Image (cartoon, grey):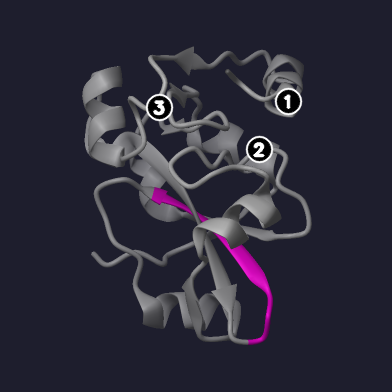
Amino acid sequence: MIPERVKQILNSHGLSALEFEPGSTPTSELAAARIGVAVGQIAKSMLFKGKNGSFFLAVCPGDRRVCSKKMKNETGTKVRMARGDETETVTGFRPGGVCPFGVEGVETLLDIGLAEYPLIYPAAGNDASGVPVTFEQLKQITGGRVVDVMER
């Protein structure tokens, strides 16, 4: 079930989520297979915690890994992946279903690699969903900063 706050954001932007069987899209590979797109089109949203205590939400292509050095350059601090409990507390979403829409108090970083695709699919707040959006729509809705943080 799509969380109400995500539904409101999607509705206000004329978007709708694709919904699947519970637990069917928790990884980029499974989501891509279920939706029928390239793994890179899955916009995985991962929370990182900086050594300085700040959190950062990185939204990245599903077929690439985050580069620690690039993340440090962009955030100004060494970062680590947030634990599951931290992710849920900070974003309101569980890992595998983190939605980049409606996350407050966290800087959102949008990797430029997502711009390579005409449509990308972030989760809609659970591990059984995807939202077809363009990179520009993602940028507008999240207010995210465009960065290059992936290994290439």
Q: Which numbered dot is residue 119?
A: 3
Q: Earlier in the sequence, mark 2 or mark 3?
A: 2
Going by the numbered disc 1, the residue's amino acid type is Ile
CA gap between label 2 and label 3 equals: 16 Å
Going by the numbered disc 2, the residue's amino acid type is Phe
User: Magenta segment, which residues?
Assistant: 52-60
Secondary structure category for the residue under label 1: helix
Q: Residue at x 41, y 51 (%)?
A: 60
Q: Which percent across, then down, holds residue 138?
A: 58, 37
Q: Which percent across, then down, holds residue 133?
A: 50, 26
Asked whether the beta carbons under mark 2 and mark 1 sit within 8 Å of each other, the answer is: yes
In the rendered image, which residue does mark 1 sit on?
9
CA gap between label 2 and label 1 equals: 7 Å
User: Eyeballing the image, is 91 above or below 52?
Assistant: above
Asked whether the beta carbons under mark 2 and mark 3 sit within 8 Å of each other, the answer is: no
| Disc nearest the viewer among 1 and 3 | 1
